[in-house]
Image (cartoon, rainbow, N blue to C red):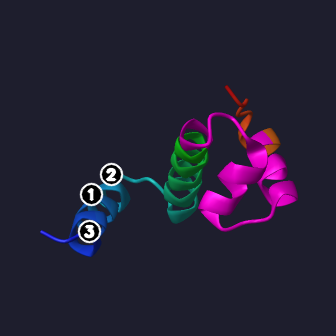
Amino acid sequence: MGLREKFEKEIKFLLHSGITLNEVLEEVEKIAIKEALKLSRGKIKEAARILGIHRNTLTQKMKKYKIRKK
């Protein structure tokens, strides 16, 4: 099973469970941010590069989700 099929299966499960699209997207974003911070050893600029977003955007999202760098 490819990555797309895995995502599709999980998203279908979540939506059938009553979780909204916005909640799904926010959870994916939080997980991606936390993982990028782990990979970058807490370096914001590097984590932003991994995610393909600007450093300021990452900082704003971290504040929104109350994520601290480790």
Q: Helix, strand, or loop for circle 2?
A: loop
Q: Is residue 11 above or below residue 58?
A: below
Q: Is residue 11 above or below residue 30?
A: below
Cα gap from disc 2 to disc 3, whole angstroms:
21 Å
Residue 33 lies, in percent from the top left, at 61, 47
Query: Which residue is denoted by mark 1 in the rendering?
Result: 13
Which residue is most to the right?
56
Q: What is the crowding at mark 1: few (fewer than 14 residues within 10 Å), some, or many (at least 20)? A: few
Q: Determine whether, in the image, residue 44 is placed left or right of residue 30.
A: right
Residue 28 tag number: none
Query: Which residue is denoted by mark 2 in the rendering?
Result: 17
Q: What is the crowding at mark 2: few (fewer than 14 residues within 10 Å), some, or many (at least 20)? A: few
Q: Is residue 25 above or below residue 66?
A: below
Q: Determine whether, in the image, residue 65 is placed left or right of residue 6.
A: right
Is there CB contact under 8 Å for labels 1 and 3? no
Is there CB contact under 8 Å for labels 2 and 3? no
Mark count: 3
The mark nearer the N terminus, 2 or 3, is: 3
At label 1, the amino acid type is Phe
Quarter occupied by residue 67:
top right
On whether residue 5 falls in the magenta region, the answer is no
Quarter occupied by residue 8:
bottom left
Residue 56 lies, in percent from the top left, at 87, 56
At label 2, the amino acid type is Ser
Query: Which residue is denoted by mark 3 in the rendering?
Result: 3
User: What are the residue bounds of the magenta stretch?
Assistant: 37-62
